[in-house]
Amino acid sequence: MNRAILTLNAGSSSIKFGLYHAADDPVEEARGQVDGIGPEAALVLSDDGGRTRTAVDAPDHGAALAAIIAALRPRLAGDEIAGVGHRVVHGGPYLDGPRHIDDDLITYLDTLSPLAPLHQPHNLAGIAAARRAFPGAPQIACFDTAFHRGHPWVNDTFALPRRFHDDGVRRYGFHGLSYDYITSLLRHDFNNISQGNVIIAHLGNGSSLCATRDGVSIDSTMGFSALDGMPMGTRSGQLDPGVMLYLMQSGMAAEALTTLLYKESGLKGLSGISHDMRTLRPRRTRARHRPWPITPPACRARSARWRPRSADWTGWFLPAGSARTPRPCGPWRLKSSGFWV
């Protein structure tokens, strides 16, 4: 009997998946996602036969995973699921690599949900569904924060009393699995560049920049939470803490602030319409619906703090969710006043 590995990335309204033949160098057999979990769910499947999109009954993550298993069953052809790998956004300050999932780990990861409310609860829902579906298969969690655990202390510390750092109020950094993948490709295809100072941009509905030296993360624009750094699809990005104090003093409760900063800001807040560039671009002739010019200055401002550490960086661009190979965006000269991708 052949053995297969299933990888899952469970989000708020989707589960992305990949099926691999288990080997020293795993071979991808199929990939896709259940999109729009709820009344309009659809399963997208890509394999050697092409790409298909099918409506499915998936009101929740458990039903979405059942739809994925049903779609993959003909491709498994009796293969055993040898293990399931999960993307988990937040691993906290100490988890610096993959971990075998057990009840104690799930309890700990749930305590981190307030730090990543758009992601962590849905990651855990995907884990719960997979544990029910494959009770005998090892389940492994891989963390976005783990790639950044080698940061110098000074880069992860806020100018607050030390007790807050000791209690976990520190910069964590996110999108680490994306950065880890890109640095592995850079080492393989552009080793001379990967051994230097590189800035990687993860651009999508969630966006960040990461500075690496010799393939190791030394800093990231995302900090304590996935709110920090660049303006994003619905998230504000870096914000003067005084703004939040003012809004609280004006009567805005913590729950309303959370909704504002995580779901109503960024491109959606600036445009007043949508976070989706496919919706906004056709309106580009109307000045009040032009939020996207904020992105290049935001990239420049966030990366400028790394300027004193090196006179010359080379930047790489990774389109989130679509690129399978890094695309060089040309020399990224931070000593120059220009910025381009």
Image (cartoon, helix red, strand yellow):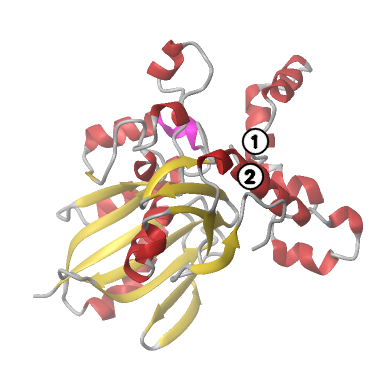
Which of the image's four quarters has the C terminus?
Answer: bottom right
Helix, strand or loop for disc 2: loop
Residues at marks 2 and 1, CA–CA distance in whole angstroms: 6 Å
Q: Name the dominant secondary structure of the magenta segment.
A: helix
| Residue that carries the numbered disc 1 in the rendered image | 238
Q: Residue at x 15, y 70 (%)?
A: 23
| Residue that carries the numbered disc 2 in the rendered image | 230
Q: Quadrant of residue 15?
A: bottom left
Which of the image's four quarters has the N terminus?
Answer: bottom left
- Vertical placement of residue 194 versus 88, above or below: below
Q: Residue at x 75, y 14 (%)?
A: 249
Depth check: give the residue in front, 28 or 201: 201
Q: Residue at x 50, y 31 (%)?
A: 224
**Labelled disc at residue 126:** none
Could you classify mark 1 by the number of other residues whose Cα lies within 10 Å: few (under 14), some (14-19), or many (20 or more)?
some
| Residue 230 appears left or right of 221 | right
In the rendered structure, which segment of residues is drawn in magenta? 112-116
| Residue 288 appears left or right of 316 | right
Can you give x and y, in whole percent of width and height, for residue 328 in the image?
Answer: 53, 68
Can you give x and y, in whole percent of width and height, for residue 287 in the image?
Answer: 90, 57
Badge 1 amino acid: Gln
Depth check: give the residue in front, 165 or 186: 186
Contact flag, marks 2 and 1 (Cβ < 8 Å): yes
Q: Is residue 232 visible?
A: no
Q: Quadrant of residue 97?
A: top left
